[in-house]
Image: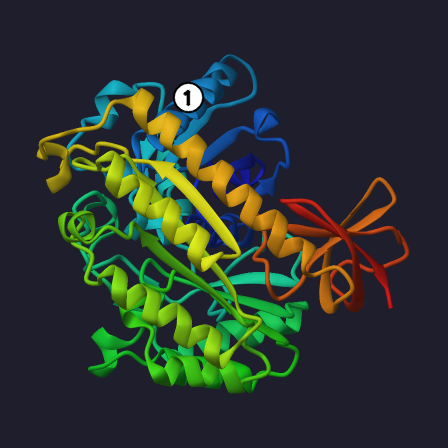
Amino acid sequence: MTEEELKQKSIGFISLGCDKNRVDLERIIYECKSFGFRIEQNPKRANIIIINTCSFIESARQESIDTILEMAHFKAFTCEKLIVTGCLTQMGFCDIEQSLPEVDAFVQVKDNENIVEIIGKLYNCEFCRIKQKNPLSRVLTNDPHTAYLKIAEGCDNFCSYCTIPYIRGRFSSVPIEKLVEEAKELANLGTKELILVAQDTLKYGADLYGKPQIVKLIQALSDINGIEWIRVLYCYPERVTDEFILEMTNNPKVCKYIDLPLQHVNNNILKEMNRSIKKEQIEFLISKLRANMPNISIRSTFIIGFPGETRHSFNEILKFLKKQKLNLVGFFPYSREEGTRAFNFKNQISESVKEKRVKKAYNVQKQISKNNNHALVGTTVDVIIDTIENGMAIGRSYAYAPNVDFVIYINNPALKVGEIYKVKITATNPYELEGELV
């Protein structure tokens, strides 16, 4: 097959997993589009299907495998090549290639930039491609007013339950100057909300500069015209320094929002998880954050049913929630992952107990969210509009990250996606808010 014949092939994409994974796929799409492939919005109609997988926990791996098998059915129709990228290809302890013969190529993350050449080999097409230098090198898969900026790869923490260091490798930061170039390109495309993501965001720069430089990075990004909000996700609580709190407090572009993946609050469980913090330090940190920023929105996640979690240690989470009244909380049943230290821990909790505890935790948090949201009625906030659906504008304030947090409905279809408006909150429920344009 010639290079020109190859360019006539249509290519479709499916992305699974987190926003960090999404950025990886956007880079793959850029490579394919810049070569000249036709991008097919419906992957089921494409000649080439690329599935960017997640494998963080067993349920994510199963979703990835199910999606691969579903797309494999279309090889009897338009699909000629099925390609798998992402975390599933990094799983060193399972022979994924032999178990999925339907897949034509498994592409590791380090080879994403060579995706075009890999596709060419599948079609016995050889060519020499000169890549264009572009600081963005991404095709955004959502409206450009909000964009993720992946500032580092991998993780060095080795929490006893987590597979990420084995899948994504050791922590590796992207240089500040490169991130600033990318952010400027995003701003030129219309990005107003920049969301910083990494597996351990506040460790940013430690490997490059000898110490974390997240504040220096934020300051550099704040100087970019067009960027109005900077949101920071995945902040390990033990890395929240006074310097970072001061920058959040005083920098008007930094959203007064922090994502603290606490995972538990029982000190024994935290130790077994290999988390470098204790409950007392967590409570002190929350009080410090609120003392500096009374309206700060605090998001967290908890792993329920970790090995050895007793009824007492689970109830400790519920008491903590009722006391701290966090704004946004997700609860996930512990997933026993082969290759992690916790896989061999004694006192594993049954799935039925995990399910009951997760449900109970959500019920407690639902009432907290209801009360927190009700207190917002009558306040006025800046809202960025994400979409217009059924005559309603749907957006978020600084207090909510996209796709994972609450939304605000405004009965005004004339509002423009990507614009920021003053909105008065008029009504709430535990998971949504309503407002009117001021």
Q: Is residue 104 visible?
A: no
Q: Quadrant of the N terminus?
A: top left
In the image, taking residue 183 as reference, residue 391 lies left or right, namely right
Q: Which of 264 and 335 lies nearest the eye of the viewer? A: 264
The percent position of residue 390, horizontal first and vertical second, equals 84, 39
Q: Quadrant of the C terminus?
A: bottom right
The percent position of residue 377, horizontal first and vertical second, equals 75, 59
The percent position of residue 264, horizontal first and vertical second, equals 29, 49
Residue ID at (55%, 87%): 223
Image quadrant in which you'd find residue 412: bottom right
Residue ID at (44%, 31%): 359
In the image, taking residue 165 as reference, residue 254 lies left or right, namely right
Image quadrant in which you'd find residue 9: top right
Local packing at callout 1 (Cα closer than 10 Å; few below 14, some 14-19, many 20+) is few
Vertical arrangement, residue 44 with respect to residue 293, above or below: above
Secondary structure, mark 1, is helix
Vertical arrangement, residue 232 with respect to residue 406, above or below: below
Amino acid type, label 1 = Asp
Vertical arrangement, residue 7 with respect to residue 158, above or below: above
Q: Which residue is mark 1?
A: 66
In the image, taking residue 86 as reference, residue 218 lies left or right, namely right
Q: Which of 108 and 54 lies nearest the eye of the viewer? A: 54
The percent position of residue 294, horizontal first and vertical second, equals 54, 75
Vertical arrangement, residue 73 with respect to residue 110, above or below: above
What is the count of numbered marks? 1
Q: Which of 334 and 124 lies nearest the eye of the viewer? A: 334
Q: Is residue 94 visible?
A: yes
Colouring of the image: rainbow
Residue ID at (47%, 49%): 329
In the image, taking residue 421 as reference, residue 167 lies left or right, namely left
